[in-house]
Amino acid sequence: MPACLPAPPELAWFKSSYSGANTTECVECAHVTHGVLIRDSKDADGSVVSVKTGAWRFFVEGLRQAHPTVSA
């Protein structure tokens, strides 16, 4: 799983539903062909984590089961 790749600038990034306007812990995600890219919203030019589609679905489903109000 590559973790230090620069993200292509044309991606459509979206913030986590748990990110607020004044929080210090925000992540952004972008859908790509092989899965999802994740980055720190305060460091848009920093490192990006790549997660395969199946792993992302497993993660989101786990969140939904633990917290039924999650809409990732």
Image (cartoon, rainbow, N blue to C red):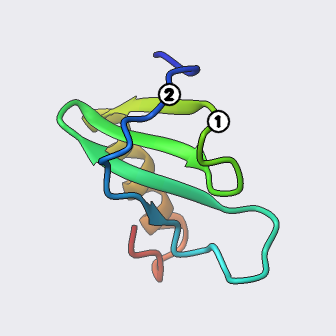
Q: Is residue 28 above or below residue 52?
A: below
Q: Residue furthest front?
A: 9
Q: Give the percent coordinates (x, y) of residue 29.
A: 44, 53
Specify the amino acid type for callout 2.
Pro
- What is the secondary structure assignment of the residue under circle 1? loop
- Horizontal side of 15 relative to 9 (left or right) equals right
Q: Residue furthest left?
A: 33
Few, some or many residues within 10 Å of mark 1 (<14, 14–19, 20+): few
Q: Quadrant of the C terminus?
A: bottom left
Few, some or many residues within 10 Å of mark 2 (<14, 14–19, 20+): few
Q: Which residue is mark 1?
A: 46
Answer whether labels 2 and 1 touch (C-beta < 8 Å): no
Residue at 54% x, 33% y: name it: 48
Q: Is residue 24 above or below residue 13?
A: below
Specify the amino acid type for callout 1.
Gly
Numbered marks: total = 2
- What is the secondary structure assignment of the residue under circle 2? loop
Q: Residue furthest right?
A: 24
Q: Which residue is mark 2?
A: 6
What is the C-alpha distance between the residues marked 2 and 1? Answer: 7 Å
Residue at 57% x, 44% y: name it: 39
- Horizontal side of 46 relative to 37 (left or right) equals right
Residue at 44% x, 47% y: name it: 59
Report the disc number at residue 30: none
Q: Is residue 5 above or below residue 24?
A: above
Q: Give the percent coordinates (x, y) of residue 32.
A: 24, 40
In the depicted view, which residue is nearer to us: 23 or 43? 43
Residue at 35% x, 41% y: name it: 36
Q: Is residue 55 above or below residue 63?
A: above
Q: Earlier in the sequence, mark 2 or mark 1?
A: 2
Q: Residue furthest top?
A: 1
Q: Quadrant of residue 42?
A: bottom right
